[in-house]
Amino acid sequence: MGFWTCTALVVGNMVGSGVFLLPATLAAFGGLSLFGWLVSSVGAVILALTFARLSRLNPGAGGPYAYTRDGFGSFAGYLCAWTYWKAAWIGNAAIAVTLVGYLTVFIPALRDPVLSVSTAIGSIWLCTFINLRGIGAFGLAQNILTVLKLLPLLLIGVLGWFSFHPEYLAIPEPQDIPGGGYAQAIATTAALTLWSFIGLESATVPAEHVRDPKRTIPRATVFGTLVAAGVYILSITAVQGVLAPEVLSRSSAPFADAAQVLLGPWGYYLVAGGAVVACLGALNGWVLLQGQIPMATARDGLLPKSLAKTNKYNVPANGLLVSAVLVTALVLIDGQGDLVDVFNVIILLGTMTGVVPYAFCTAALLQMLAVSPQNFKARERSAVALLGILGFVYSMWALYGTGEQAIFWGFLVLVAGIPLYTWRQWKNRLEAEALGHPL
């Protein structure tokens, strides 16, 4: 993969379910959501710069797992990989749910719970089969889908400002804010909007498939993050200014509803189609990662070795298939109830499990600087230290914003992986002793 395919992976993994359903989630917060966007955008750029620096230090495959392992050792690396892997397939469940929401514009029968769940699962397996065909098939699909998804977003983002109602973005009274209080509201909206940036590190994961990774990955990571931030703020704020908050909060396809106001029925269908394409693009990219993430960890003997096996197209087929089964199970469990409510629960849990690896990686950058300062030029060490500190503080604040419920379940997800690590170490010892090399 070159610069543009890596950028398409970064943008494609970020611009998906978040941007197309998020306006409905943010409706209750009014103008406070702008503060959330400001915080999450600045934080995302800091994280992008952190990953750009880490990818220059270690351009090998594995992304967050590899950086955490290099900084803190195998156990911390394993916990990072375990949590990041869960973030990938939890996020894919949210993307699949959103995809179905926009497909109902064309197929109203999908409002039936059985059909909607079946369609969501079908989209997951479609992208899995594309990725099983190798990086070439993935890259072609990802480049096309990324271009197609940006067009309707930019269209609404520009036209929406000609029918903008500033009063729709008024700051609500404290008693009307979900959760109560301005500080908590800004933290919550920052966490919700950060979901749209989860994936900014995507180009670091399949590094072994990237041409000139030390140069390509940092450039694609930072450029892709800036492109996504611009598209988000332009388009989502426009939608919030076109639709009244009480209408927006009940919408399962807010961009399409805004397009109908601006362009009439044909605009409604145009943007709904674009949203479906966007969700497919994001799903395709994250399916790639949910196979690549456990592969690097399994190669180091920290997960079952079967997850490191590749097929004739040199992709981790077992990792892709196991992950697809896990996403399918999550959709079956959470695929009932109101679409926006289901989406909110999933994205807060997905954001929490996605931010934990960010905290690991920003701390790992500081650890590398402390332990091996010779790997950094003398004139850049202060800037690297500041970058790591800001990234870590932001990651911790974002974790706070996901709320008690997400942190509770996310912590259980984190701890649940420890027995698997212990079992794998036991297996490693038995295999070493069988070969006459006791650990």
Image: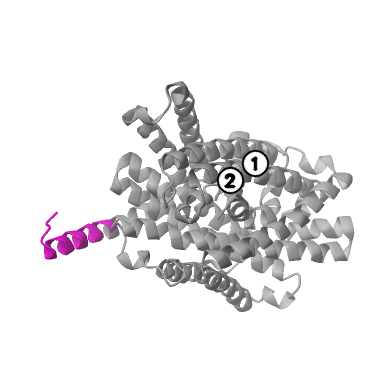
Between residues 95 and 257, which one lies in front from this camera angle? 95
Question: Could you say which quadrant of the image residue 258 lies in?
Answer: bottom right
Q: Is residue 337 above or below residue 66?
A: below
x, y percent for residue 173: 71, 37
Mark seen at residue 7: none
Q: Is residue 379 above or below residue 138?
A: above
Nearer the camera: disc 1 or disc 2 = 2
Q: Is residue 61 above or below residue 93?
A: above
x, y percent for residue 202: 52, 51
Between residues 309 and 412, which one lies in front from this camera angle? 309
- Asked whether residue 184 appears in the rendered view, the answer is no
Between residues 93 and 55, which one lies in front from this camera angle? 55
Helix, strand or loop under label 2: helix
Report crowding for label 2: few under 14, some 14 to 19, many 20 or more residues within 10 A (C-alpha). many
Q: Is residue 427 left or right of residue 317?
A: left
x, y percent for residue 150: 72, 54
Residue receiving disc 1: 226
Residue receiving disc 2: 220
Asked if the magenta segment contains residue 199, the reply would be: no
x 66%, y 52%: residue? 25
Amino acid under disc 1: Leu
- Tell me which segment is drawn in magenta: 421-439
x, y percent for residue 237: 75, 45
- The reply to whether dot 1 and dot 2 touch (C-beta < 8 Å) is no
Asked if the magenta segment contains residue 435, the reply would be: yes
Q: Main secondary structure of the magenta part?
A: helix
For marks 1 and 2, the one nearer the N-term is 2
